[in-house]
Image (tube, rainbow, N blue to C red):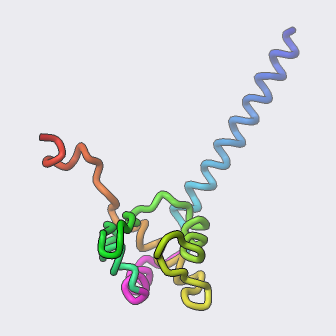
Amino acid sequence: MGSVFSRTIAVLAVSGLAVLGALGTLAQSQESSGGDSINGKRVYIAAGCFECHGRVGQGGAYTGPAPVVAKTVLPVEAFVAFLREPPNNMPAYTASVLPDKAALDIYAYLQSLPGPRPPKDIPMLND
């Protein structure tokens, strides 16, 4: 009985370490996309992203509801995939139109922005 319990604890410990390692890799991937946020801002404006998503990624409703993209929760790989094959009426940015380096730069720019404030920090919403 004791050896079964010991094995179960060992398996759980190893599994927990594997999960923590995977989460650490994802967080590192999100923090260090390898992009240049200064160039990302330039590309974001030049590619016209601001026309729907706003100059600081705040989102908008010009052509329909465009989501907030500042401080996106998407991992960098998912963000680039989303640019390549977006849903709805967002234009696709193929690698020939927006190279991977430019996409990484935009991601770095969006991650450098403050992102949306929590509702509790907006006085008008707490009256």
Q: Residue 91 or 5: which is nearer the viewer?
A: 91
Q: Quadrant of the N terminus?
A: top right
Q: Residue at x 48, y 57 (%)?
A: 73
| Above or below 84: residue 28 | above
Write down the quadrant of residue 5 in the picture.
top right
**Magenta residue span:** 35-47
Quick check: is 37 in the magenta stretch? yes
Q: At 38% from the left edge and 80% from the top edge, which residue is drawn? A: 41
98 vs 21, left or right, is: left
Q: Is residue 60 above or below residue 123?
A: below
- Does residue 7 appear to the left or right of 80 in the view shown? right
On-image quarter of the C terminus: top left
* 106 shown above or below 12: below
User: Left of 42 or right of it: where is 85?
Assistant: right
Q: Where's residue 55, x and y in %?
A: 30, 76
**Residue closest to the eye, 83 or 4:** 83
Count up the numbered dots: 0
Where residue 86 appears, as percent x and y from the top left, is 54, 72
Query: Residue at left 72%, top 42%?
Result: 18
Q: Is residue 45 magenta?
A: yes
Q: Residue 25 appears at what percent x and percent y?
A: 63, 55
Magenta: main secondary structure: helix
Measured from the top left, where is residue 65 in percent x and y?
36, 66
Question: What residue sits 76% from the left and 35% below the top?
Answer: 14
User: In the figure, residue 37 lies in which quadrant?
Assistant: bottom left
Q: Nearer the viewer, residue 121 or 82?
A: 82
